[in-house]
Amino acid sequence: MKKFINNPENITSELLQGFALSFPGHEPALSGFVGEGMLDFSVVGDIFAAPGAPKVFEALKLADRPAGVLFVVLNHEGDVMAAKMAMEMAKRENINVKMLLTHEDISAGLQTDIKDRRGLVGCVPVYKIAGAAAEAGLPLDEVYRIANDFNQHMATLAVAMSNATHPQSGMAIGDLPEDEMEIGMGQHGEGGGGRMKVCSADETANIMMDQLCAAVDVKPGDELMLMINGTGATTLMEMFIVSRACHIHLQDKGISISRSKVDELLTVQEMAGFQMCIGKFNQEILSYWDKPCNTPYWCQL
């Protein structure tokens, strides 16, 4: 493992210090979406680990306002455990908070209960839409309704061609043969059960897009959001080629991609691969997507 780090035990603290110095006030991934029009707080755990409940509760207290707090949690065991404990603490303190759980990973199968589906990059468009609704001054129940409407109509699949290493131990997370890729990979390199020989960009995009469209019941005439999220070692060149394939594949079916975003938004160290996320737009949700925001990782005029 070759990485520009110091003492592995200090990675998280040094990373946060560097991030705050570069963007005064706010990587670990989601911290990059703190700012006007998106998040007010991002609670950080250690590398590949959930934050503890006391740290989450402290953020809820800091965020507490008369209008209330929308608390977005990705569906991973450690995150959910911490979130539930923090919600109990918040209840005792009479903090007005509603929790929204993102669970759009369909790798476990379309018949799997949504409570058993992982949260992947789909949290980011939820932040954008919910943040814009909150910025517009809507009450908490309305912000939750709008965000959850989109949350219930989006789906994500991830694919990897090489695994990441843990930056504190140097250990590889999983093992993929040189000639194989895996569709259904988790956020931290967990296996997804969809190993196959490496396919072309077009073939990979078509396989994934068909599954995603089935998951959210896409029909001709629908307008979609498309997000291609690089997981660390995939170039923008590759991601744009995949995005091209998605647009062409859907155009042939009479389906429009109204808005798209292609970037490294939620990475997995140096994993080679990407996450493909789609979501259904209606005019209300689209209007909030188009609102301005100003964060380190997403700035929109």
Image (spheres, helix red, strand yellow):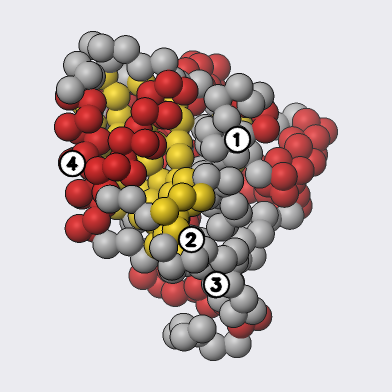
Say which mark, if any, is on residue 108. Answer: 1
Q: Which residue is mark 3?
A: 165
Q: Around disc 1, counting alpha carbons within 10 Å, would you say few (fewer than 14), some (14 to 19), or many (20 or more)?
A: some
Which residue is found at the position 41% from the left and 15% from the top?
A: 217
How far from the left and from the top, in percent, is residue 113?
66, 24
Image check: 99 left or right of 53?
left
Numbered label attached to residue 272: none
Q: Quadrant of residue 157?
A: top left
Q: CA distance from mark 3 to mark 4?
A: 30 Å
Dot placed on the residue nearer the N-terminal end, 3 or 4 = 3
Whether pointer 3 and pointer 2 mark residues with C-beta atoms closer than 8 Å, the reply is no
Q: Residue 258 appears at what percent x and percent y? A: 21, 26
- Residue drawn where x is 80% and y is 35% of the image: 88
Q: Which mark is residue 244?
A: 4
Q: Measured along the vertical axis of the image, is residue 1 above or below residue 136? A: below
Does label 3 or label 2 sit earlier along the sequence?
3
For mark 4, give the secondary structure. helix
Q: Which amino acid type corresponds to the residue marked 3 in the rendered image?
A: Thr
Looking at the image, tell me whether mark 2 or mark 1 is earlier in sequence order.
1
| Labels 1 and 3 touching (C-beta < 8 A) | no
Disc 3 packing (10 Å; few <14; some 14–19; many ≥20) = many
Q: Amino acid at mark 4?
A: Arg
The label nearer to you, 1 versus 3, is 1
* Callout 1 amino acid: Ala
- Upstream in sequence: badge 1 or badge 4: 1
- Label 1 and label 4: CA atoms lie apart by 26 Å
Q: Which residue is mark 2?
A: 268
| Foreground pick, 81 / 277 | 277
